[in-house]
Image: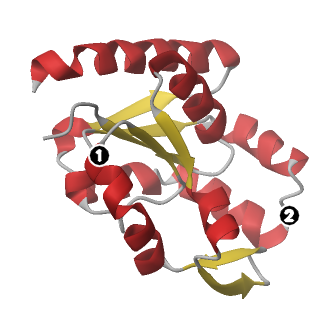
Amino acid sequence: MRSKPNILVTGTPGTGKTSTSEALAEATHLRHINIGDLVKDKKLHDGWDDQLQCCIINEDLVCDELEDIMDEGGNIVDYHGCDFFPERWFDRVVVLQTENSILYDRLSKRGYTGAKLTNNIECEIFQELLEEAKESYREEIVVAMKSDTVDDMNMNVTVITEWVSSWGSAT
């Protein structure tokens, strides 16, 4: 039995996962694990996708790398996908959502163009990550949170921090 919860923060690129996860880690003293950075740092990928301009993540290698850390608890995992992580790892799955025009501006500022931009906007329009989370985890642990502004992010961090504080007594 873990003494601290594990949280997955997911959502389309540009919804504020990393900013929210960093603020949440500071507020809760949980460990922030950015999967994109982990994949690059530990070379847990199968090369480069030229069309989408990103590493091709090796999901098995990522799960092997994280297994012991996740069993300990006290982790905030930050990644735009969620269906390959074992269900047993997470006590809360937070899906950040951003209004499409705001998301478009954020992704454009990051240099997203063409298929990469279109695919991510469509992913948000069709709420693909929320559906993926609901299909992959118990529905009662999946929470969608609006992430359009800094105020939204701060409110989300407050709500999740309160949940973390009550987690030990609720389990």
Q: Is residue 136 left or right of residue 81?
A: left
Q: Along the horizontal axis of the image, is 110 left or right of 37?
A: right
Quarter occupied by the C terminus: top left
Dividing the image into 4 quarters, which one contains the N terminus? top left
| In the image, residue 82 above or below residue 55 | above
**Horizontally, is 88 left or right of 67 in the view?**
left
Q: Nearest the camera: 125 or 106?
A: 106
Residue lying farthest bottom? 46
Is 59 or 140 nearer to us in this picture?
Answer: 59
Measure the C-alpha gap from mark 1 to mark 2: 40 Å
Residue at left 48%, top 60%?
A: 81
**Three-letter amino acid code at the position of disc 1:** Glu
Q: Position of residue 138 (x, y in %)?
A: 17, 47
Q: Position of residue 101 (x, y in %)?
A: 73, 38
Helix, strand or loop status at disc 1:
helix
Q: Which mark is residue 72?
A: 1
Q: Is residue 28 above or below residue 104?
A: above
Q: Give x and y (percent) for residue 144.
A: 39, 34
Q: Position of residue 27 (x, y in %)?
A: 51, 16
Residue 113 badge: 2
